[in-house]
Amino acid sequence: MKRWQYESAPDLDQSLVERLRHFPRQPDMLVYGLRSVAAVIIRAWLRCYHRLEIIGRDHLPAEGSFVMVANHSSHLDTLCLLAALPLAKLHRAFPAAAADYFFKSVHRTFVATVIVNALPFARQVNIRQSLSLCQTLLENSGNILIVFPEGTRSESGQIEKFRPGVGALVANRNVAVLPCYLDGAFRALPKGSIWPRPRKVRLIIGAPRNYASIVNSRDPANAVAVELQETVRSLGQRYGAN
Amino acid sequence: MSPQIALHDPIFLSFCSVVAISLIAGGFVLGFLRLGLKKNIVAMWKTYCSWLIMAPLGLVVVLAGRVPVIVGVTLLAIFGFKEFARASGVYRDWWMTGAVYAGILTVGIASIIPHPRGEEPGTGWYGFFVAVPVFAIALILIIPILRNRARGEVQRMSLSIVGFIYIGWMFGHLGFFANATNAYGYLCFIIFATELNDIAAFTFGRMFGRHPLRSEISPKKTWEGAFGALAVSMVLPWLLRFSLPDFGPRELILAGLIVGIGGQLGDLSISVIKRDIGTKDMGAVIPGHGGILDRIDSLIFVAPLFMHMAGYYHPLK
């Protein structure tokens, strides 16, 4: 009789926290189940407590990879963007999260990986490495990347400057880029506060854009970042956000 | 079982002292090895520190009551099977993994609910509990039929069935003890005696080990360790006789044999799987012990054998 071939998990010798910090993570049925249950609860919470309204959901591509680019002023932002996606795509959506903030302590790592399915993004060192991680992710059709190009939560609620990295990520790449504007999340849960206030939150999803024809070098990439920033800002203005 | 009853139960309270004394004694032995004999005990110290957390945690769960014990055993079985699935590669097949999880949950539910027509005394539906494998295996067997797939399915079905029977069902017997009349005595005795048997095997093996027990399966285990552990396990039921008040000499001897031999067999049976897969530990969850499965493996044979032995001589519940 021939020997069976076992395909052990490649991260067998790592402890639980190491496994969660590692990316890409191995698919895990229990984690997927927990994440789905959490997503249903979070969506219900956003709908009831924050009266979340999603405008332009029909702009979400039905298939293929895409990038959601949004302004960032609150921890609620990621949850709202995830809530806009169909549940079936939840486990293929990866919000890029600051590795130095979300992947340091054990409980934040746990929340970031199990609930949010975050991709650890090193924003201080090895940005290039993190960007290439995002790019390989997008090569797999069907993956969704969520990025906040401001690099951190805005402390004033106003849109800050988009970092050029987002331009380098999407320039010369045939993926749909969805500009998104989040309104109200800052009032509901600004940086530094712990418990969310019952303020209305709106998510406006803009028409998809494509930067496949842009050369991926410094100046064009910067221009893409500036253009995306303006698009997100104008989305907010068009829908009367304050 | 409930916190109020536990706090007035002489058997449970005695076991709290037994565990505390054992942990303190273990600490003294390690301290003597380190300071008196200048031995390197880094690995053993790690193992010991994990015990300092696991032993009180176990006692707290037993204190909390019947349902917490069954839920705890079910969770251990689920995460134990997850380690097995990750090591053997079955975890990639979500249908099979899901079927085994469903089976493990059914074992837990059968341990909690009473007989629907009240034909059995007390809680726990024994008749269904012992029949769960029929349903779980049937579910595993029909999955390839539902999915219209044959290639490689025998391997997946076999691994899933082995995983369910070993970890879900045989280990799951531990949870059913929570329904027994002498729940505190049985639960505390089995867990304490089995873990002590493990430690005795390790200690005797380290001190006198010469002849490998099963060289092809687990190169570090020795005949000396196995006999030393068996000797300890044969004496232990007499020392802890207060926890098994119904047991006569015949049952006490059988209890010693079941713990002494069953504990080693459980360990070796998981080693066979690890050896064939080619991994040293099933996981790295518990520092100094390896995975959950590496810790609970000795109970795989002890729990069901002890339950049926006890149930043969005395009504279980």
Image (cartoon, grey):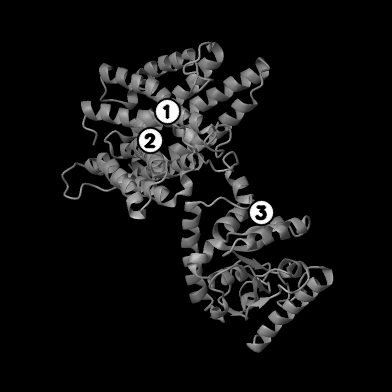
Identity of the residue drawn at 81% across and 68% down? A217
Q: Label 2: how many residues lie within 10 Å, few (<14), some (14-19) or many (20+)?
A: many
| Residue B115 numbered mark, or none | none
Name the spot of residue A2 as percent of width and height, x first: 45, 32
x and y, in percent, of residue B151 in the image: 41, 46
> Which chain hosts label 3?
A
In this picture, is A153 found above or below B16?
Answer: below
Please say if the residues under marks 3 and 2 sit with CB atoms less than 8 Å apart: no
Mark 3 residue type? Phe
Q: Residue A100, relative to residue A223: is it above or below?
A: above
Which residue was labeled with disc 2?
A: B166
Task: Please state which of residues B61 and A153 is positioned toward the viewer in this rendering.
Answer: A153
Residue A202 is situated, as x and y percent measured from the top left of the image, at 58, 80
- Pointer 3: what residue? A103
Is the residue at mark 3 from the same chain as the one at mark 2?
A: no
Q: Residue at x 38, y 47 (%)?
A: B150
> Whole-Å distance between the Cαs marked 2 and 1?
9 Å
Assign a secondary structure to mark 2.
Answer: helix
Check chain identity for marks 3 and 1: say if they share one: no
Task: Give the Cα distance between marks 3 and 2.
Answer: 36 Å
First in sequence: mark 2 vs mark 1: 2
Residues at circles 2 and 1 in contact by the CB criterion of under 8 Å: yes
In this picture, residue B155 sits left or right of residue B107: right
**Which chain letter goes with mark 2?**
B
Locate residue B3 relative to residue A200 in the image: left or right: left
